[in-house]
Each structure stands twice: as C-alpha cells, then as structure tokens.
Amino acid sequence: MKKIILVSGDPNSINSEIIGKSWKKISNSLKKKIYLISSYNLIKDQFKKMRFSTKITHVKSLIEGENDNSLKIINVNLNYKNPFSVSKKNATKFIYQTFNLAHKISLNKNIKGLINCPINKDLFKQKKIGATEFFASKCKIKDNSEVMLIKNKNFAVSPITTHIDIKDVPKKIKSKIIVKKILNINRYYRILFNRNPRIGILGLNPHNSEMRNESEEKKIILPTVLKLKKKGINLNGPLVADTVFIKEYKRYDVIVGMYHDQVLAPFKSIFKFNAINLTLGLKYLRLSPDHGVAKSLIKKNKADPSSLIECIQFLNKFGL
C-alpha cells in the first residue's frame, strides 16, 4: 500500500481545522494511507481547543500503523506557549524541519506523493519563494523547469514565473524556460490522465503589443509556440490575456500565463477556491490546497476543507 504524506504547514493558521474536518469526510481505507508530519502536541492541543474528537496516534515511521485509521503523526518538536500563536522564530524552524522531512520521506518509492497545508511565505528565510520553489530547490532543479499548476476537474492554469515582482518578469521570459515548462505539463498530463492536453499560452503585454517586432510576443513567445507545435504539442498562442477568460479558455485544458496573477486572478474569480495546487517536474508529486493560512478564521470553525479533501483524493487516484 503506497502512503500519502501530509504536512501540517503553518502552525498559525486554519490548517488543523481543515485537517480535522477532512478526516471526518474521507473513507477509512484512505485514512490508513495518510501520515501527517507535524507536532503531535500541537495537533492535540489545537484539536482540543476546537473540540475535535479525532483520534491521533504518535508513530515513528511509515511502518507503524499501516492498518490504523486514526490520524497518524510523525512528530517534529515545536516550542510554543499558545498553540494558536507560535512565535515566528519557532514557526520558521518548524516549517523547515517538517518540509525537509517530507522531502526526504517522499523520495521513497512507496509514497504516492506529498501534500503540504498552507504557509505564510514570510516564514521562508529566502525572499520571494513559496513551497513550489522550496521543493524544487530540494530536488536540485536549477533551470526553473518545475511547474505550478492550479487545477480543478475540468481546467487548469500555470504561470511561467511564480513569486517574483512584476518588474522582474520580462527578464525571466526565456524560450528555453517556456519549452521546459510546456513539455513538463504535456508529459504529466499523459502520465496522469493518459492524454495530450490542449494548451493555450498568453502573451506578456496588453494586446500582445500588437505583435510589434521588438515585443516579447514576436521575439520569444511566438517562435517558441511554433517550435513546440513542431514537436507535436497541442499548443496555441500567444493568446490575448484580457479577453481569453471570458469564454475562449473553455477550449483548453490548460492556460499558461507569463506571470502569477495573470492567470491565478481570473482563475480564482471564476472558480473561487475550487482547485488544488500541484508542482510538476519534481522527484515526486507535490500538492497543496489552493488557499492561504486565513488567520482571520482561526478557531472560528468557518474554514472550508474541500480543497484539502480534493488534494487527498487526487493524490490517492493519480499519485505516482
């Protein structure tokens, strides 16, 4: 039985709530596959504060509790006084320890993949990175070929650049990076879903700069599209970003944009948080719920666990 690794993420968040609520809704057979990397005491104290009756078990390895449908926790120590107000220093240390352990365990062939619950990106010591970039670094990916894919059952979007400032985006729009990311998307759709995806790629500038000769659309994006089409990739573009999400996006399985908010903002406007976040191109499949830590909802019993449940069910069905 292949296991699913779940990482509790930011201790100052709604994560324990969505984990507890998810546990009530998934099947017992699925529960047996899941191992949570977290602080046993933190989860116990947070569940107690929220009056969750979920049974939790402290295990030391993936060998323990294989037939146990309680919430199995591989413990990482965390210092705190208030379980919902952990200091930034301790939370940062905790994130690095849990993420590093998750990476190490996920290299095991007996793992379907890992799911990390949301984190505050300020906890990373490096600037302008998130979980996508962290796990890419751990997998020694140095060419930016990893792919952030935000997906629901019928549609997905992916940005070429991720957590960087807008002013830095044009410098990162390179043909070789676009090629690697598009090939990764195509490869994983064939592996996971047994089909070639219909991919649309956006231009960078308003109205695609009217395709002027000096534009990124004319110099970089269009030649790259033609190169990929010759490789047999079902790809169209550059599409005009300000109109594609009115109706045209429905023709595609994936819309690839040049920067984060170019595709994530319209996607979330249309689908809200009905999605999961996948990282493709790592040594394992990595997912996370498509929402943040939602500090304003902590202890209010209002957090929606549906995205985490989708992550668990997706990984169980399509995990490598």
Image (cartoon, rainbow, N blue to C red):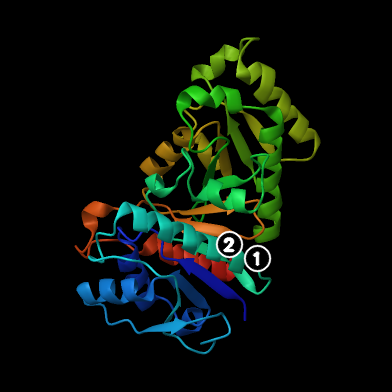
Query: Residue extending furthest bottom?
Result: 67
The reply to whether the C-beta atoms of the residues labelled 2 and 1 are less than 8 Å apart is yes
Query: Residue extending furthest right?
Result: 230
Residue in the image at 48% along x and 38% along y: 163
Query: Which amino acid lies under the numbered mark 2 shown in the image of this protein?
Result: His
Residue in the image at 60% along x and 60% along y: 285
Crowd tier of the residue under label 2, counting other residues whose Cα lies within 10 Å: few below 14, some 14–19, many 20 or above: many
User: Horizontal placement of 251 versus 72: left or right?
Assistant: right
Query: Which amino acid lies under the numbered mark 1 shown in the image of this protein?
Result: Leu
Is residue 83 at all visible to an observer of this figure?
yes
Instruction: Check residue 140 in the rendering and tell me which mark sits there, or answer none.
Output: none
Please name the residue that numbered disc 2 is placed on.
103
Q: Where on the picture, by quarter, is residue 75? A: bottom left
Q: Nearer the viewer, residue 130 or 277?
A: 130
Q: Nearer the viewer, residue 69 or 43?
A: 43
Residue 141 spot, x, y in % from top left:
66, 46
User: Horizontal placement of 265 versus 113: left or right?
Assistant: left
